[in-house]
């Protein structure tokens, strides 16, 4: 009985030390690299509303083509198409992920609805991972936003950017 109690106390102590180290690393990274922390917060709360005078399918094809997105997770990690579908309402949904076959570090969703003069929709980060308080893959997430913006400009559409506070990572 004493051995079980000792093991339970040791496990609790190890978990507490791990949590303290993780929190300390997060605080240190935020202090050393405040720009990276702020950029991650900005990108994970950004919502870009868009419209373009082309079909949702044509718009998505343009974004995917310019990003050179892989169909499956690259072994060494990178950007790939996690899901692409048309729902019952006719909305085109594309989820791009950053990761490898074992794990996704981030997911960004682009939802487009057909409208009378083309398509309208939005793009936002729906899932992300942080390492010591800094968002992983921030450059790749930013790249996706930039390519969507480029596609909007290419087709003569418009965008508006807003910030949506989130309670935490999805």
Image (cartoon, rainbow, N blue to C red):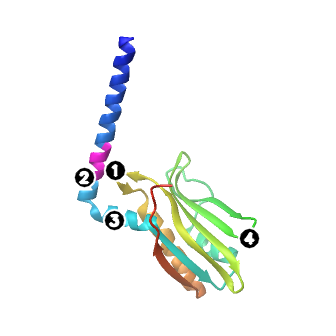
How far apart are the alpha carbons under marks 3 and 1? Answer: 13 Å
Residue bearing the label numbered 3: 38
Residue bearing the label numbered 4: 90
Q: Earlier in the sequence, mark 3 or mark 4?
A: 3
- Mark 3: few/some/many CA within 10 Å (<14, 14-19, 20+): few
Position of 92 relative to 99 (above/below): below
How far apart are the alpha carbons under marks 2 and 1? Answer: 8 Å
Q: Are marks 2 and 1 in contact (CB under 8 Å)?
A: yes
Q: Secondary structure at mark 3?
A: helix
Q: Residue at x 27, y 46 (%)?
A: 24
Q: Residue furthest top?
A: 1
- Horizontal side, residue 154 vs residue 142: left or right: right
Q: Quadrant of residue 70?
A: bottom right
Q: Earlier in the sequence, mark 3 or mark 1?
A: 3
How far apart are the alpha carbons under marks 4 and 2? Answer: 47 Å
Please tell me the numbered disc located at residue 28.
2
């Amino acid at each position: 009985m004493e051995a079980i109690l000792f093991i339970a106390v040791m496990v609790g102590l190890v978990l507490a030390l791990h949590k303290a180290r993780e929190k300390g690393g997060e605080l240190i990274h935020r202090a050393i690299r405040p720009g990276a922390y702020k950029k991650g917060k900005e990108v994970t709360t950004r919502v870009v509303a868009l419209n373009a005078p082309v079909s949702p399918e044509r718009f998505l094809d343009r974004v995917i083509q310019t990003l050179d997105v892989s169909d499956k997770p690259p072994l060494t990690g990178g950007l790939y198409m996690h899901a692409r579908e048309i729902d019952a309402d006719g909305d085109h949904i594309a989820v791009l992920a950053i990761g490898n076959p074992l794990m996704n570090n981030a997911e960004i969703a682009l939802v487009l609805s057909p409208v009378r003069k083309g398509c309208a929709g939005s793009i936002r980060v729906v899932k992300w991972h942080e390492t010591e308080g800094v968002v992983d893959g921030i450059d790749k997430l930013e790249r996706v936003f930039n390519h969507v913006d480029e596609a909007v400009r290419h087709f003569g559409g418009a965008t508006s950017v807003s910030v949506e506070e989130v309670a935490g990572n999805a």
